[in-house]
Structure formats: C-alpha cells, structure tokens
Image (tube, helix red, strand yellow):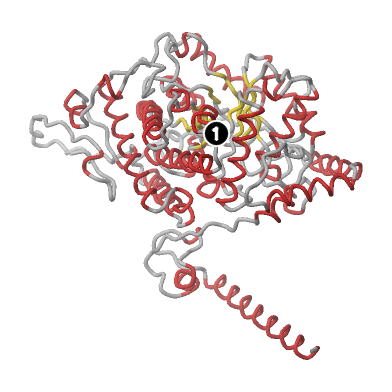
Amino acid sequence: MARRGPGQKPGLQPRRAQTTEAPVSEGKKEKKPRVGLMAGHFDAETVYGPEQLSLFGFDPAVDLGKPGAPPFTRGVQADMYRGRHWTMRQYAGFGTAAESNARYRYLLEQGQTGLSVAFDLPTQMGRDSDHPYAQGEVGRVGVAIDSIEDMRVLLGGIPLDKVSTSMTINATASTLLALYVAVAEEQGVPASALRGTIQNDVLKEYMARGTYIYPPRPSLRVISDIFAWCGEHAPKWNTISISGYHVREAGCDAIQEVAFTLADGIAYVEGAIAAGLDVDSFGNQLSFFFNGHNNLLEEVAKFRAARRLWEKIMRERFSAKTARARALKFHCQTAGMTLQAQQPLNNVVRVTIQALAAVLGGCQSLHTNSFDEALGLPTAAAATLALRTQQIIAYESGVTDTVDPLGGSYAIEALTERIEKGAEALIARIDALGGMVAAIEQGFPQREIQNTAYDYQLQIENKDRVIVGLNEFQTTSEPVPVGKVDPALEAEQVARVRAVRAGRDATRHAEALATLERTARDPKGQRGRADPRGGEGARHRGRGRRRAPRRIRRAPGDGDGLVGHLLRRHGARPLVWAHRGARPPPREHARRVRARHGRRRRRRGARRAHHRRR
C-alpha cells in the first residue's frame, strides 16, 4: 500500500495495485524501502492502470471535458499554444530604475514578450530609500521605486500599449499600480488599454515572505478597492496574482501549495463579494501564480488539479455563472529553492524540466530562473540562456503542437485526482477554522509549511532525497561570474528621493495625505484614484501596522524558560526555536528577563514622578 502522511485520510490516495512478485532469491539483499517523496509522503506507483482511476470514480466526460471548457482540466483555451505561445516573462529588477530599464530593453530585443518587475525590499515595505530601515537593502533584490520620477525612468522607451507587465508587489500594490497608470497616461496610453498583473496577494505574506504592512482584514479591503477600480478603469488588467509560489518556496508540498493558494483565493473572492462586487465581473481579472518544481509528472498534475478544483469552487461556492469567471489562469516561475550553488550549471537542467512541466500543465506565462541565481543576481548571459530555454521548448520540442498532450495518461490522471482530493480536504480543514484569514491568525498554515520544510530537509540530510551535486555526485566546479549591485547606487538613489521630497508642493502633499488618511479611516471607504506620490504613512495611521504572526509549534521541553513563558502567556513560540526538543539559549533568556525588569522599573519611576508633579 502507498505510504500515507501523518493525519492523511486513507481515501485521499489510491491503493497500490496488487501484484504477484517472485520471492527474493537467497543470498540477495532486500532493497531499502522507498521513502515517499511526493506530496503527502506519497510514493508513486510502479505501474498505473485503470484500477487506480476506478478508486476515485474517475469519469473522463466529467473530470476531463474539453480544452477551453469547464472544468478546464485540459486548459483554459481550446487551442492552447496552437494559437499563441505563453507570455515569456523574465523577472528582473535591480539597482536603480535606469539599470533595470536597460535590462528590460535588452530582454525585449532578445524576444521576451512581457515584462516582470522585481522591486527591492524597501519598495515592497513602503519605505523610501533614505529611511533608516532601508539601509543596505536599496536596489539589492529588485529595483528601487520611490516616486513617479523613478517609474518614468523604469518604463522609458517601453511601449506600454503593446507590452504586458507583471509587477511582483503586494502590500504597496495600489501605490505602484497608480504610478504605472500615471506614467502610461503621460505616454498617451489610457488605463483601459493596459495589460498586465499586480501580485497584490497579501495573505501569503503572513505565511511565507513577511513583506506585509497592514493587518490581514484591512488588507482585504484595499484589495477589494483595487478590484473595483480596475473593473471600471482597467478591465484588461489582472488585479491579483494569487500566489502559491512563495509558500512552495517556504517549504510546502504540491498538495499544500494548491490548497493554500486556492484558500487565499476564496478569502479574496469573499471579501470582494462582501464589498458589493459581482463575482462574474471581477472573477475574470483574477490570476494565479504557481511554482514549477522538479517532479515533472506531479507538477503537471498539480496545475491540472488546481484548474479543476478552482472551477468547482467558483461554481458551487460562489455561483459564478460565466465560464471566464471560473477559469483559473496562471503564471509559473521555476523553483528558486531548487537551485544549487554547487555545480551551478546543473541548474540549467533543473530549470528546463521545471519549465517543461509548466508548459505541459498549461501555463499562460512563464519565468525561467537563471542558473547563477543561487550565487547572486543573474548576469545578462545567464538571463539570456534562461529565456532561450523557453524559446527552445516553444519552437523545437514539439510539446506545443498538441493541447494537453499528457491528458488521459493513467499516471497523470491518477496524480491529478490525488492532488485535487488532498487539496480539497485541506481546504475543508481551513474552512473549519473559520476561513483562511482566521487560519493565518491561528498559525495553522505556517505550522504546516514549517513541518513539511523540516521533513524535506531531513530527507536531504539522510540522502533519501538525492540532490545532484549537493549530497551525491559531488565534484568541484569552475566558478561562474556573479552579478552584483554597486553599493554606490544606494547613495545615488537616496539623493534622488531627497531631491523629489525637497521639490514637491508641501501644501498639496499634506492635503493629499490628509484625504488619504480620512479615506482609510472611513469604514465604507472610497474607490477613487490613488495619489501616485507616496502616502504609505497615512495608510499606516488609518489601518495600523501588522505585528508578526504567532508561531505556535509545541515541542518537548517547553515547560520552562522563555519558550514556556511565551506558550503559557501567548500560545506562541519564536520561529528560531521551532525545532522539536529545542530550548531557548540561556543568555538570550537572561537578557530578555533583564530587559523586562528594566521596563517595569522605568514604568514605576514614571508613575512616581507623575504623582509627585500632581
């Protein structure tokens, strides 16, 4: 029988087919039992046949249908890549807007068909480049955008009416979209003609990345406002890219990736409906963002299962009437966490397999990682090779000639059924907790991801999971060039933002911020056009900052010390001590106790001084 993970119901996966095997001959060593390396600790069947599908009650007419028609198992377009290839987006952004603009124009000249913009951490967190918290991070992992002047430089010479742009931005998505729209209108391109996507998926930030600003519930209101504005003014723009990519990068498996991503989608749809929006109007502007991992068959099945399950959710839970509102469109990026610094050229092979899985799974757009990204920013040569990987798959491999070429395979259909059923069961658990927002507040998905990531690492360390060049087949390799950001660029960006601040109209700026704060404090809100020149501080005052989510994984030895104190008082434990059996470092415990006593002494002293003054 196939292995089951802890807590997994027997009905969620097919039983291993009964076979008659010859007895092991004397003198032969028995094979080491295989470890289930697929989602849910599942081990693939040796051979798949109709008996596996019969266990699920598989009906091709119902479960497959036709490409371009519900339940969209076989794709969201009838002709898929026979009509047009997926959009080839190479995610890029570093240093200043001018440097990133040069890379974008280079990639467009090489045949890229869409932009994908990476922003640095201060921009993602709503911090100007001269903020103390931004020091050392400006332009490091993306481009720094502090004002409309930066956005003008970033998009200079790029025809925004012809190029589709994806912006990986979440907490500050409304600000960056406003800047993008303003620059487009300066170029003479109306908002109604713009095509692209903002990621705008804040819920996964609490689970995986941490670049949130506002608490979850106010964040949903901002997202609903964006839905409404774009529905009226930018109908071709995808208002959200509900992201499973980052939770997969954080360590979850394929079933969890589908479940947590679609559960986030459910929360966003519920928020939009509660705000009075029509599901058939905004449903067409939803898109998804998935990870492409190494197990080719499981990944193809994952994409097919996600499409089918989302169609069911939109039809049964939200009564979406139009097929377009029920169709799951997705962007895919190959898995950054699978890239290895050891023997980095092997990453070319990994990326090729992952990209092939995305294409066979029916993606609408694709980014392929560069082989050197485990070492630093991708060089131009590495980024070009990553783009060429997509082009060779598109034009030379032949897999684009047939829609859903793996459809009907016993293995693919059985894996699709298993992933769908597993994700559906996990979503039911989230519903029982009160929905995804409540589950995040209780730390449920965070714990699930941490546990799976821990198991994955143990598999590598025990060599149950072989990573070529890392824990097996190790050799020395020649060093490869590594892209780096010149530290002097940070000083230039700081000077630029200070010049913008010194040159703006102080009165108009104050009035705009006051209007923004009033809107944020208004329970009903206003769905007008955002001021494109900042305003995150006003939103903070209106909505509050979000504290770090609780980490609630209990372990032996938690009864005393700082961890025990946190568990008794808050029901939480710090992530750095989340491993089973770990205890807090004694020095850290002592330091925190001294700090706590010091705060108490200062408060008592302040109270005494207050009474003396009276």
Picture quadrant where residue 54 is located: top left
- Rendered-image quadrant of the N terminus: top left
- State whether residue 382 appears in this view: no
Is 70 positioned to the left or the right of 55 in the image?
A: right
Element at label 1: strand
Vertical placement of residue 482 versus 559, above or below? above
Residue 15 position in % (x across, y down): 18, 36
What residue is shown with label 1? Answer: 241
Q: Is residue 34 above or below residue 597?
A: above
**Nearer the observer, 4 or 258:** 258
Answer left or right for 529 relative to 32.
right
Mark 1 Cα-neighbour bin, 10 Å: few <14, some 14–19, many ≥20:
many
Q: Look at the picture and state if 511 lies above or below 72.
A: below
Q: Amino acid at mark 1?
A: Ser
Residue at 63% across, 14% down: 111
Q: Nearer the viewer, residue 474 or 307?
A: 307
Q: Residue furthest bottom?
A: 612
Residue 482 horizontal/vertical position (percent): 65, 32
Residue 178 location (% of width, % of height):
72, 34
State which quadrant residue 495 falls in: top right
Indicate the position of residue 406 as horizontal and vertical percent values. Answer: 34, 18
